[in-house]
Amino acid sequence: MDDEKYYIVKKKALPEVLLKVVEAKRLLDSERVMTIQEATDAVDISRSSFYKYKDDIFPFHENNRGKTITFMLQMDDIPGLLSMVLNQIAKSNANVLTIHQTIPIGGIASLTLGIEILPQTLELSQMLESIEALDGIHYLKILGRE
């Protein structure tokens, strides 16, 4: 089916309306606007143009910046402990992609993090050791790498 082919096209080759649709979708996703009408007004396109193209254009995100690591840890339910974990990641120059924390049961919460390891990220083992060394961290396990 020719309608289902995909192309990578430079931004300068795209019609302005398609770029505005992408921007309207970004505004909606970021919740800077609450309705499609507000989004289309903000980027100066018609709602019909938005609906016509919204499912056909997406930004292209390269995934060559770095490797991704997913790990989980069990930690005490102590105010500020999650912040300290995130601070260790930031000090290592890694990028947090996802965070999921369970509701603490018996004073213990599970935390799963997806981290992007960038070229400027310090040694991974040092980052993980610094997290494990925090008071209140019980267990850290690497779940996967890409």
Image: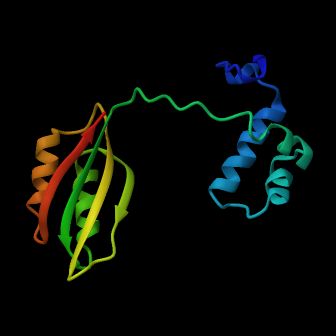
Residue 77 location, x and y as percent? 23, 78
Left or right: 86 in relation to 12? left
State the image coordinates of residue 90 (x, y, percent, origin top left).
28, 52
Determine whether, in the image, residue 57 is placed left or right of residue 48. Answer: left
74 over 10 or under it: above or below: below
Quadrant assignment, res 140: bottom left
**In which quarter of the view is residue 53 placed?**
top right
- Number of numbered discs on residues: 0
Task: State the scheme by which the image is colored.
Answer: rainbow
Which residue is rendered at x = 28% and y = 63% of the image?
Answer: 111
Q: Locate the C terminus and report the quarter of the image it occupies.
A: top left
Residue 46 shows in the view:
no
Name the residue at the bottom extreme: 106
Residue 114 vertical placement versus 84 (above, below): above
Q: Position of residue 15 (x, y in %)?
A: 82, 26
Q: Is residue 94 left or right of residue 122?
A: right
Identify which residue is drawn at 77% across, 41% down.
54
Of the 4 image quadrants, the one containing the N terminus is top right
Name the residue rendered at 20%, 81% in the picture.
107
Q: Quadrant of residue 57?
A: top right
x, y percent for residue 122: 19, 39
107 with respect to 29 (left or right):
left
Q: Is residue 146 visible?
A: yes
